[in-house]
Image (cartoon, grey):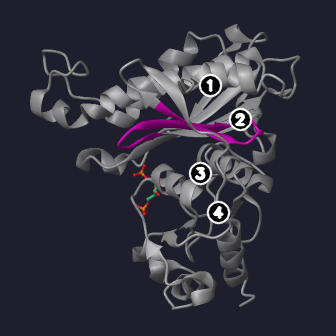
Amino acid sequence: MGQFPLTLSSFITQKQANHQGATQELARLLVQVGLVGKLLAQDLRRAGLIDILGTTGEVNVQGETVKKLDEIANETFLKVFQQSGLVCALASEEMEKPVLLPDHWPQAQYMLLFDPLDGSSNTDCNMPLGTIFSIVRLRDKDRMPTEHDLVHKGTEQIAAGYLLYGSSTMLVYTIGQGVHGFTLEPGIGEYLLSHEQIHTPSRGKVYGVNEGNYHKWSGGTQKYIDSLKVKDTATERPYSVRYSGCLVADVHRILLGGGIYLYPGELDKPEGKLRLLYEANPLAMVVEQAGGRASTGTMRILDVEAKQLHQRVPLIIGSAEDVRDAEVFIQGRR
Ligand code: AFP
């Protein structure tokens, strides 16, 4: 009889115990992220009903206004981690300032940055949504954390990953030892190993970008996107467009099957839309660990100097050869 698939916690403790970064606390931290995913998956399964029934647990009988799901997602992270004792600071796309937890210091030296609900414009139309997380360690262990301690270069991440709320709920993570995917079995409330050691093909056949912004792009970006539509047997072009409005869903497709996602800089907004610390950096760590590449168009995402918590950055991410092609055009070398 086939072996029962490994759960998230047994996989981390069994398969990654030998990795110097895989402390017990980190394993427990990742399992707690999984708990947030289970709670959010439940909320999202009922999102459409909140308006209709108005009594789905999130709205009391007085019919108090329903909090936006972004806020519910953010509060779920705070509730789970403020009482976990596992982190000494939390930073979120939904909070201008981080939540510092000095009471958990010094036993907790990890800090968690997250986008609690990525793709929130998809909530009302039952399209995929995601959560992105990045884990860093307090550099100076002899003092309590400050906001500045959360601002790390991508290469300093200890772990990173995402939750994808699609036809099934998945958790994908890396601690620097490959990328592994787990699928939630709702019947038992466990994440089971479904995608061990994910590898991204060096080239794909799809691209994800908001073509409605074409007129805002530099000439190099426009030329690159144009090149994807020209027949070329060597690179199996033209590519197909796959753009869902949820970065996590689009990157997950590319992580497994290859291709490229772009949210480029624009002429009047060269820094682009996406955030460095809790969107680009964690996804860049995951994609690089799967053999892919993540760039601003001119430099490696993980090498970008982080200066402030909600800093934006252009993101070109996916199959290594596809991203390299995009860089050549964006840098005007073609
Ligand atoms: P929202 O969370 O505001 O919907 O933004 C989603 C997102 O950050 C990312 O998930 C999408 O890929 C991208 O923005 C979509 O942005 P555009 O609507 O500008 O194409």
Residue found farthest to the front: 1
Ligand 1 rendered quadrant? bottom left
* Whole-percent x, y for residue 10 in the image: 64, 19
What percent of the width, then of the height, locates residue 113? Answer: 62, 34
Q: Pointers 3 and 1 in contact (CB under 8 A)?
A: no
Dot 2 corresponds to which residue?
159
Q: What residue type is labelled 3?
A: Arg
Q: Nearer the viewer, residue 326 or 96?
A: 326
Amino acid bearing label 4: Pro
**Pointer 4 or 2: first along the chain:** 2
Q: Which quadrant: the C terminus?
A: bottom right
Between marks 4 and 2, how big is the CA–CA gap? 22 Å
Kindly report which numbered mark, 4 or 3, lies closer to the viewer in this rendering.
4
With 190 as the anchor, is 309 left or right in this view? Answer: right
| Badge 3 or badge 2: first in the primary sequence | 2
Q: Do the residues bearing badges 1 and 2 touch, measured as CB atoms within 8 Å?
A: yes
Q: Spatial distance from mark 3 to mark 2, Cα to Cα?
A: 17 Å
Q: Which amino acid does label 2 sit on?
A: Ala
Q: Mark 3: which secondary structure?
A: loop
Residue designated by label 3: 275
User: What residue sits 57% from the left and 36% below the top?
Assistant: 114
- Looking at the rendering, the stretch of residues picked out in magenta corresponds to 164-183
Q: Which mark is residue 30?
A: 1
Assess disc 4: are there few (<14), some (14-19) or many (≥20) residues with their C-alpha within 10 Å of its C-alpha.
Answer: some
Total marks in image:
4
The answer to whether residue 75 is seen in the rendering is no
